Amino acid sequence: MTEQLLAIARNTFVQSIRQPIYFVLLGIGILALILNLSLSAFTMDDDNRFLLDMGMATIFLDGLFIAAFVATSVLSREIHDKTVLTVVSKPVGRPLFIFGKYLGVSGAILVAATILACAFMLTKRHQVLQTASDVLDWPVIIFGLTAAFLSLGVAVWGNYFYGWVFTSSAVTMMLPTSIIAWLGVLAFSKEWKYQLLSAEHGGMISPDLDMALIIALFALFMALLVMSAVAIAASTRLGQVLTVLVCLLVFLMGLLSDHMFGRRAFEAEPLARIIEIEPGRDLDDNFADEGDWYIIRVDQALELSEGMMVDVASDPLGMSSIMRDLPGERADHAQIRNLNQTSLELVRIDDGRPLRVPRLDDYFLSGPPTVHPLWRVLWSIPPNLQFLILIDPLTQGHYIPFFYILEITIYSVLYIIAVLALAVMLFQTREVG
């Protein structure tokens, strides 16, 4: 069974990267990332922060369209042309066929996303030319153009002399050359100074290695894998146009699920909003060590009685509570002390996994929110892409703890399994003969 699964996945992967639409969309994505350098120069604020925002959005939208078009080509078209009969008529179960198709499509999506991510990190290193004194980043330009011309040149040469398929050859070459280009940029500064493990930069791997961006791109890859599962499920019953529309609809619902369903799924009583934060002591900025504390000022007086339950959440509905405390008593992770109407101190009282550091515009709530089951179920149906597309934490410089990455990975895997189970049920009764 494993050999059959891998054979289907391998055939689907090769079939996916050979499609002209795959290569065209990948090229459009790379071109859009390059154009973002010019388009981000008109914000009248922090152009490079907007460049991050546009780059992440470009990778996701381009990956979404690639997933939709590729899934319909490898599944919906096979069903329409009845070529799927050559597989399911043999001792290959339909669930195995669906999972194999998903693995192949996911592999093609990850290859495209990796190439786009490398191009994005090159543009991030180059940055927006905001003033006349800014100079071009020649290592980025030379490494990037070398990777592009080498990939296209080998693909043209192989196609002319050996009959290789141009699209798959170009993509196969672009993957390693784009990674090598990114590593080359990490190794050299704008002035062509070697900077790997340099004592000048404190022995860090490279001053241009942004781990927060790597984490955000990983979360983005997980979002694309979720959308690939949605595309496979839609392709079992729908054609190309309708599959693309379903993917766009799920994408919009995933972004708006908090507004449409989440705000009705939870009901809480906000007591005050945080308007000022000053770190008292938190050397590593992750609120994980015993004794870490913050001075907090809120917009109105907090009238708390002894034993009253208090939550801190990033929204007034309490959907994302970050701590729970009994004033004057020991809590699970954090404790309020020195409460004086509109000011207080929030103290970490044990060593453990990092808590999210309180932020401006977080809310103190009177207690855990009341959950409305029906709206809670509706809220859980579309994928909550706001948890997976970490544009705001990235552009605002917030710390992203490892535990959060573990949580979104588990969430994505479970959601993919659920969607593929739906795809199997839809395909199980589909007439293919």
Image: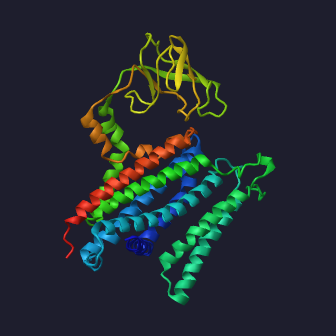
- Horizontal and vertical percent for residue 368? 38, 25
Q: Quadrant of the C terminus?
A: bottom left
Q: Quadrant of residue 83?
A: bottom left
Q: Is residue 20 left or right of residue 116?
A: left
Q: Position of residue 289 (x, y in %)?
A: 62, 30
Mark yes or no: residue 21 visible. Answer: yes
Above or below, 338 against 363 in this view is above
Q: Nearer the viewer, residue 186 or 409?
A: 409
The x and y percentages for residue 173 are 57, 73
Asked if residue 390 can be seen in this view, the reply is: no
Which residue sits at x=65%, y=51%?
209
**Residue 201 at x, y = what percent?**
76, 47
Horizontally, residue 216 falls left or right of residue 182, namely: left
Colour setting: rainbow
The residue lying at 61 percent from left, 73 percent from top is 149
The residue sitting at the bottom extreme is 161
The quarter of the rendered structure image containing the N terminus is: bottom left
- Residue 47 in the image: above or below residue 262: below
Residue occupying image coordinates x 45% and y 63%:
109
Q: Toward which corner of the image does residue 95 lie, by quadrant?
A: bottom left
The one nearer the camera, 227 or 243, is 227
Q: How many marks?
A: 0
- In the image shown, does 136 or 230 lie closer to the viewer? 230
Examine the image and state in which quarter residue 67 appears. Answer: bottom left
Residue at the extreme right: 199
